[in-house]
Amino acid sequence: MSLSLFLSNNTCVSLYNLFKLLTQSRICVSNINSTVYLQTLNINFPTIIFFNKNIELMKKDFLSDLNNLRDAGVVFYTPEEAATQVNLVWDYVHDWWNSKKVQNSVSIFCNKYTKR
């Protein structure tokens, strides 16, 4: 199933199907504060997250943790910023994702928010 088909049908994807889609993907872009980005970060899959921090309800400590991911180029607060990052890292996703800065930020975040 293509991502565009998934989005146009508003189909709910099981965790199995998410992982199947990831095997056909270079990077995951998550645009909602949900478990998808927690799952992809937890399995250390290249992920870019964007959402409007002024709309989403977040505690200050969580927002601080997101800002650490933002500093590493993983979290963005506009779709334009996220798209710029996707274009920037597209040809070397694994080099970017495996950089010390990204891996350290993801590890700290996952140790706090996921069952790693």
Image (cartoon, rainbow, N blue to C red):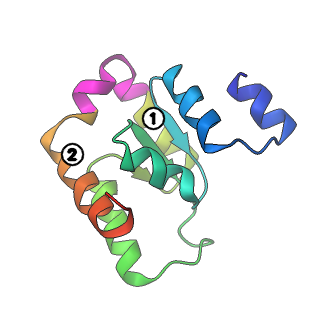
Mark positioned earlier in the residue sequence (1 or 2) = 1
Residue at 74% over, 27% down: 4
Q: Quadrant of residue 98?
A: top left
Q: Is residue 80 above or below residue 55?
A: above
Nearer the observer: mark 1 or 2; the answer is: 2
Residue 8 in picture, x, y percent from top left:
83, 34
Q: Nearer the viewer, residue 4 or 13?
A: 13
Main SS, magenta residues: helix
* Residue picked out by circle 1: 84
Residue 50 in picture, x, y percent from top left:
52, 52
* Residue 105 on the magenta span: no
Local SS, label 2:
helix
Local SS, label 1:
helix
- 103 horizontally vs 42: left or right: left
* Residue 93 on the magenta span: yes
Give me the C-alpha separation between circle 1 and circle 2. Answer: 20 Å
Q: Can I make out residue 83 in this image?
A: no
Local crowd size for mark 1, using a 10 Å CA cut-off: few (<14), some (14–19), many (≥20) = few
Q: Which amino acid does label 1 sit on?
A: Thr
Residue 29 in picture, x, y percent from top left:
53, 39
Which portion, as a residue range, is magenta? 87-96
* Residue picked out by circle 2: 103
Q: Is residue 59 above or below residue 2?
A: below
- 83 horizontally vs 10: left or right: left
